[in-house]
Amino acid sequence: MVVGLSAAERRYLTDGIAQGLRNDGRGLYDFRAFSVELAIIPQANGSARVRLGATDVITSVKAELGRPQASRPSQGRVEINIECSSTAAPQFEGRGGEDLSLELSRALYRSLLCNNGTGPAIDLSALTVIEGKLCWNLFIDGLVLSSDGNLLDVLAIAVKAALSNTGIPKVEVTSAAAAEQEADFEISDNPDDFSGFDVSHVPVIITLTKVGRTYIVDATEEEESQMSSAISIAVNSAGHVCGITKRGGAGLDPSVLLDMISVAKEVSKSLLSTVDAEIMAAESRGDDQM
């Protein structure tokens, strides 16, 4: 938590941003360098850790067989739960951490699973084993270990990396089921007998934080402490907007919002390339074999 910023420090920070100068030397739309590790939780079907500056998060994916919802017989189910460790920052203790955890979980769900005209980023139909009877349910859990701003964007990177590391075991149906009966099946215990998860449509999230009259990408905690509002825009590899989340009480003119979306689409191109490169580097190091 940023405390003790004097009036002069706040003025220095906001005036610098207004002139395109940030305390760490980045441009207005530059991300900090980040690293990706894969397969850090052996018990999970997939997992990842992402460090960006002092922001450090872990995500895991657990796959469990279950019965599909009656209203969606040909789809599996995905649940997302984010927790902010009380030791990560003083403001995460008690109710503050609970509220932020819920906010982050909902924002990720909207970006990954709501149909915003392009279809959900995660193909739920690919999780079906037997229509109406058996499907995979994915439980995506995230833990914020420490924070130096831009949590939502970092968590989105970690979720994409964890899903890329996820293996779904092969299921063999041994007998077909009648309408009123359950099917018999066997789950392969061969660690090499699994299918990977398609993350080609999973977006990244670009949060544009408004400080004064200027908005910036990948705000630090100091910069976030001076924000009037923030817009988080999920963009996939096709350049489609998958979800938008707003924080802060200040309103935004529609023309400003359209410009922010345009900036997010442009920034997403380089960020997606960097994320893919970091995931490939982690795979080449053998992280996914741990």
Image: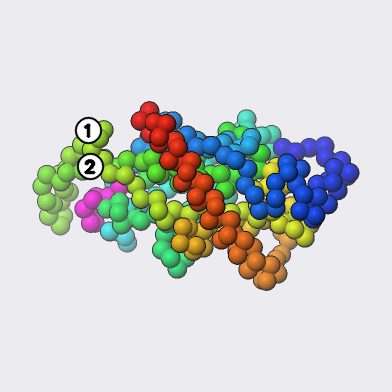
Q: Mark 1 points at which residue?
A: 190
Residue for point 34% across, 55% down: 124
Residue nearer the viewer, 161 or 187: 161
Q: Which of 241 and 109 is in front in this view?
A: 241
Query: In the picture provided, is 84 more to the left or to the right than 290?
Result: right
Q: Is residue 4 left or right of residue 51?
A: right
Indicate the secondary structure of the residue bearing disc 2.
loop
Please tell me which residue is depicted at 58% across the width and 56% down the height of the picture.
267
Q: Which residue is at the far right?
A: 8
Q: The C terminus is located in which quarter?
A: top left
Q: Pointer 2 and pointer 1: residues touching (CB < 8 Å)?
A: yes
Q: Extreme bottom residue here?
A: 255
Residue 277, percent across and down?
A: 47, 44
* Residue 40 falls left or right of residue 18: left
Magenta highlight: main SS: strand
Classify the position of the N terminus by image quarter. Answer: top right
Comparing 281 with 151, the one in front is: 281
Q: Provide the residue span drawn in magenta.
A: 129-136
Specify the amino acid type for callout 2.
Lys
Q: Is residue 177 magenta?
A: no
Q: Distance between the residues labelled 2 and 1?
A: 9 Å
- Could you tell which of marks 2 and 1 lies nearer the N-terminus? 2
Instruction: Inspect the image, locate mark 1, and give the three-letter code of the amino acid beneath it.
Output: Asn
Q: Relative to 265, say whether 84 is above or below.
A: above
Q: Which mark is residue 170?
A: 2
Measured as percent of width and height from the top left, residue 40 is found at 44, 30
* 217 up-or-down from 6: above or below: below
The quarter of the picture where residue 244 lies is bottom right
At a point 64% along the width and 49% down the height, the residue shown is 30
